[in-house]
Amino acid sequence: DAKTTQPPSMDCAEGRAANLPCNHSTISGNEYVYWYRQIHSQGPQYIIHGLKNNETNEMASLIITEDRKSSTLILPHATLRDTAVYYCIVRSQSNTGNQFYFGTGTSLTVIP
Amino acid sequence: GAVVSQHPSRVICKSGTSVKIECRSLDFQATTMFWYRQFPKKSLMLMATSNEGSKATYEQGVEKDKFLINHASLTLSTLTVTSAHPEDSSFYICSARDPGQLAYNEQFFGPGTRLTVL
């Protein structure tokens, strides 16, 4: 079962920062937070992941609270191509393969 | 990043027939692959974990005799939907783990296969 909750939808003006929140209050100490996005009718695309520290790459920044119960994905300058469903996933640890259980995600619409 | 392909990208079949979907890791060897299904406007639902050389592990509520998974090589996993019915119509997506990139991004997703059962 998914261990995350996200708002179902958000809008963001083109060129502005998009801040997408995620709640994962039951996360375990060794579980990572992953963010993927899915553009309509395509496979999910990896964005970023983290454990405790804030992370940044060419696509986005990930801010994880100190208690690790929530995180925020930041797209610094949203473009129309960033319109997608964004999934926050807590990677489950298991002997059979570290499964991803997707929650409902946030549908982000970037507005011109 | 690593590339995962799926074939076919879309398939239409008659009710009662079986359909095979292939998932390939193109530039890495995947000891573990995953199969998901996604209904319109819904999230991805994990169906099963496929480990090379062993039986797949199915999620609760997924019929193993209905959805046959074979992972015979380190680069290929197949999902066969047996005796397909219209309610099996869905978007099927696979992903693969790259053991060589555990510190980066463990799962790479294929582009998906749209199955329509008439």
Image: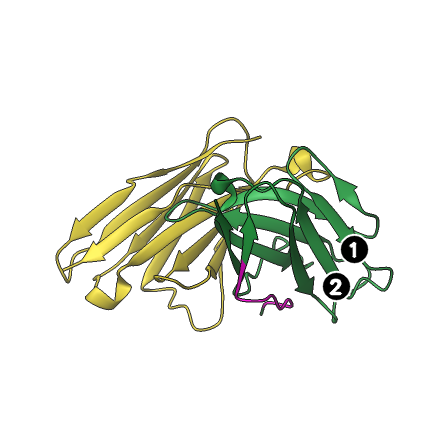
Q: CA distance from mark 1 to mark 2?
A: 6 Å
Q: Is residue B16 magenta?
A: no
* Nearer-N-terminus badge (1/2): 1
**Which numbered marker is on residue A64?**
1
Colour mode?
by chain
Please tell me which residue is depicted at 16% across the width and 53% down the height of the picture: B13
**Is residue A92 or residue A58 the one in the foreground?**
A58
* Callouts 1 and 2 in the same chain: yes
Dot 1 falls on a residue whose secondary structure is strand
Residue appearing at x 74%, y 71% in the figure:
A26
Tell me the chain of label 1: A
Q: Which mark is residue A70?
A: 2
Give the x, y percent position of residue B63: 37, 68
Above or below, A29 against B103 in this view is below
Chain B appears what colour? Answer: yellow
Image quarter of the C terminus of chain B: bottom left
Q: Residues within 10 Å of mark 1 (few under 14, many from 20)?
A: many
Comparing B112 with B70, the one in front is: B112
- Using the rendered image of the protein, determine whether residue B107 is visible from the camera's viewpoint: no
User: x%, y% of residue A80?
Assistant: 48, 41
Label 2 neighbourhood size at 10 Å, few (<14), some (14-19), many (20+)? some
**x 61%, y 53%: residue:** A97
For the residue marked with disc 1, what is the amino acid?
Ile
Q: Is residue B79 left or right of residue A101?
A: left
Residue segment shown in magenta:
A2-10
Q: Name which residue type carries label 2.
A: Ser
- The chain that appears green in the image is A
Q: What's the chain of the residue with tag 2? A: A
Q: Provide residue B117's location: percent of width, then percent of height.
A: 19, 59
Is any atom of residue A27 visible in this view? yes
Residue B89: x %, y % from top left? 26, 60
- Does the magenta stretch mainly form a helix, a strand or a loop? loop
